[in-house]
Amino acid sequence: MTRTDPADTHNLHPAGRTDAGHTDAGLTDADHARIAAAHAAARTASTRTVYRYAWRQWQRWCADRGLPALPGDPAAVGAYLAERAAHGITMATLDVACSAIGHQHRSHGVANPTTHESVRQVRAGLRRTYGTAPHRQARPLSVPEIRQVIDHIDRTRPIGVRDTAIILLGYAGALRRSELVALTLADLDHHTAGLLLNIRPSKTDQDARGQVVGIAHGQHPATDPIAALDAWLTRRGRQPGPLFTRVYATRIHADPLTGNTITRMLHARAAAAGLPAERITAHSLRAGHATTAALAGVPLERIAAQTRHRDISVLIERYIRPLDALATTSSRDLGL
């Protein structure tokens, strides 16, 4: 983030600042800077970005109607939510909008319109009208599909070597795309039994403790994630820096990748392999690990330890129950 959002400072510069840069409470500019940095760290960069985007949408909507965005009127918030729901916006997105609007109002010390009873009623009514079902999730990739994708990658080219390593490491580790792009050479810890990855703080690790993920050797040379990573390191070199970097033609650069790059890459690789790629994203690797492990009978606790789900109910709802629905469906007994 290149600038500090007003909401991220929580009004840390109140009236009463003296000409010397001090407040009546004796706080200095350095004090305010440190406090602002701590407040900013309370939310991840991605959360702050989403909040800013949602807030701008609310501001534009209010500007079009000649209404103040701050402080916002509860009736206006209700109308805004109802209009967006009618245009197909999901309840999850509307919940984020309410969080962003509420965050800005709290930050500026004014009444939060999203907590007004009229807004609560509107949100409850929209849930009953439109439901809370999310958009279709990323399609989990199975091991045969991973092999199919890998088999169609030209591993004689640097970019093919890199993409193979990303796919296999992401699948084996149940890694998020943000975790893949954040990996550096220093995060690798090689052992005889496999590889340990030092995962930097992520959205389920708000206290920035970091986590360690184990990667076992593969059973087949073509899909061994550690062998694929070693092949990439042979091309990349052992110099410090991002583990996965950009490749231009045959030249390997030190520039890190972005999460969107990984999504686009996997989508393109899946399509090239003849898979229906419409719902294949970077998350298909993580989802594929979870569902494949569940089908193999791996205990839920072990899967959750690998995926690092703090809330096991999320793991059950997204990955386990869809499998149970297929396993227990009575439709196969109808004789159709």
Image (cartoon, rainbow, N blue to C red):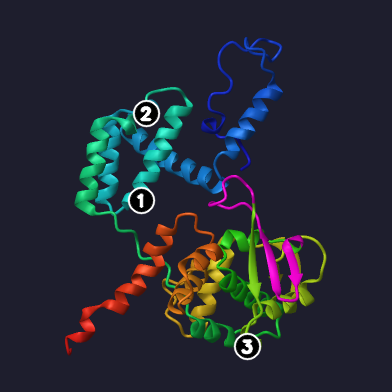
Tell me where residue 279 appears, x and y as whole percent. 42, 71
Tell me where residue 163 appears, x and y as whole percent. 63, 75
Indicate which disc residue 92 carries: 1
Indicate which disc residue 112 carries: 2
Q: Residues within 10 Å of mark 3 (few under 14, many from 20)?
A: few
Quick check: marks 3 and 2 in contact, CB under 8 Å? Answer: no
**Secondary element at tag 3:** loop
Residue range in magenta is 186-209
Q: Is residue 95 magenta?
A: no
* C-alpha span from label 3 to label 1: 41 Å
Indicate which disc residue 220 carries: 3
- Front position in the image: 111 or 20: 111
Indicate which disc residue 330 carries: none
* C-alpha span from label 3 to label 2: 57 Å
**Secondary element at tag 1:** helix
Work out which residue is located at the far bottom of the displayed protein and give it: 335
Direction from residue 302 to residue 186 in the image, left or right: right
Tell me where residue 28 appears, x and y as whole percent. 69, 18
Q: Is residue 199 magenta?
A: yes
User: What residue do we see at 43% from left, 62% from top?
Assistant: 315
User: What residue do we see at 64% from left, 53% from top?
Assistant: 210
Which quarter of the image is occupied by the C terminus? bottom left
User: What residue do we see at 75% from left, 66% from top?
Assistant: 189
Q: Earlier in the sequence, mark 3 or mark 1?
A: 1
Amino acid at pointer 2: Asn
Amino acid at pointer 1: Ala
**In which image quadrant can residue 232 be found?**
bottom right
